[in-house]
Image (spheres, grey):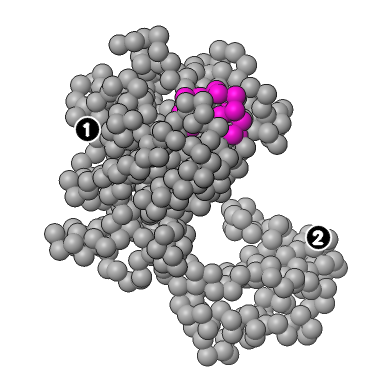
Amino acid sequence: MDTEKTVRIAGAQGFYGDSPFAAMQIAMQHEADYLMHDALAELTLSILQKDKLKDPNAGFAKDILIHAKTIYPIAFGKGIKIVTNSGGLNPNAAAQQVKAILEKQGIKGIKIATITGDDCVNRLDEFQSKGLLLENLDDNTVYEAKYPVTHANVYTGAQAVKDALDNGANLILAGRVADPCLALGILAHEFNWQIDDASTQESLNHLAFGITIGHILECGGQASGGNAYSEWPMDYNLSNLGYPIAKVKANDTAIITKAKNTGGKVSRNTVREQLVYEIHNPAHYITPDVIVDLTEIELKDISENEVAISGIKGKPKPEMLKLCIGQHEGFVTEQFFFFSYPYTYDKVQKFIQAVKEIWSKLPIKLEETRFNIIGVNGLHEDAVDLPSAEELNQRSELGVRIAIKHKDDRSGKMAMQSIVCLGLNGPPGLISVPGWGNVNRAMLSLWPTLIPRDLIEQKIEYFEL
């Protein structure tokens, strides 16, 4: 084992639509050997599926086309490799379009790899025919296909990332490879770690460590001071946030830092806050390649914007993989209204009463209605007791968010059109700006379940220029 070798991986993107400037600065300053772009949240795939239905050549995170024009030429010129799951539902179409953009810029000698095999949208009947109940992870109910399916993707692991890099890929465009597995694949390639056949405690610890690095990097600037409660009030600049960079050794130690001359902050606080993000159980963080135990982790501030990390343990990988089935449950229609002082709260209540009475007379069915008062219970509903009506009547202004769930697009339009008259005839002091709300926005939901891992096989294809 080369104990001196250091691999530098930058968290270059936290979501589809994230700013490219941090990644560009890292590439220009050559502060990483790899850029890891994580573009996929669970519902992002539903958005990509809508794109793909309109255009069979779409279905991937479109910002990679911008990256291909801006970041990729800089990165490839400095020997930096890029690993991303921006391929979404259509990695091969993404590769073709990225290849064309790079060719127009005269870039040669680059191998693009795509990773597929996660898309199961046409396999649900097959799974059920094998006796799988596709039980919901949240409430154990059996899947009944009540709603149209928007997508169905299984979280896959790091083996294909490693294999593609072993075969000389400069750019990997994956589908639903699990976010932290992007980094694990890089480290397994660099340090020749075993993934699918890992069995010893040492090899499991390697995998757990690689997943932890990926987890720290996967949300971009969240590990380097963005969105940090633990550093509030923030004593650093947010406008030029430097994204996190992991300097990793083969002995399962690393230093987390950020690019020079950037805003943000890397501290024990920011790193540990990211560590507990979305992992459910620190002793049992389940990923496709390994179960991670973070209970003995060591984090140390070693200098300004440098945190040392070590002490992660691994347990054998799960037998099942997580499958997320996206569903189109219907539509949400919403609108915002604002009322001014005096009698602010009384006006709101009078308005809500009138809306309810009007809707009760319409020939439509509303599945669910919500009336939230902005500034009072708009975010957390009844998490705290409401102020008294007397106090709320003294507010300079109050807003009302009306939201309704319905199954057909006719109901949303009719419901909103029926209360337009209240702008003229309702309580005084009402303001509603047309275009603030949304009519008939698709309501998407997720059905999380598990399937045996032997039903899924990752596939790698290459595109060279």
Q: Looking at this view, is 40 or 52 the one in front?
A: 52
Tell me the residue at 49%/76% (across/down).
Answer: 406
Outermost right residue? 342
> Residue 269 lies in magenta, yes or no?
no
x then y, percent, for residue 315? 26, 29
x then y, percent, for residue 93? 39, 53
Residue bearing mark 2: 395
Amino acid on which the number 2 mark rests in the picture: Arg
Q: Looking at this view, is 370 or 224 the one in front?
A: 224
Closer mark to the observer between disc 1 and disc 2: 1
Give the crowd class for mark 1: few <14, some 14-19, many >=20 residues within 10 Å: few
Please identify the quarter of the rendering in which residue 113 is found: top left
Amino acid on which the number 1 mark rests in the picture: Asp
Tell me the residue at 67%/24% (across/down).
Answer: 261
Give the crowd class for mark 2: few <14, some 14-19, many >=20 residues within 10 Å: some
Magenta span of residues: 22-36
429 displayed left or right of 292? right
Please identify the quarter of the rendering in which residue 381 is found: bottom right
184 displayed left or right of 355? left
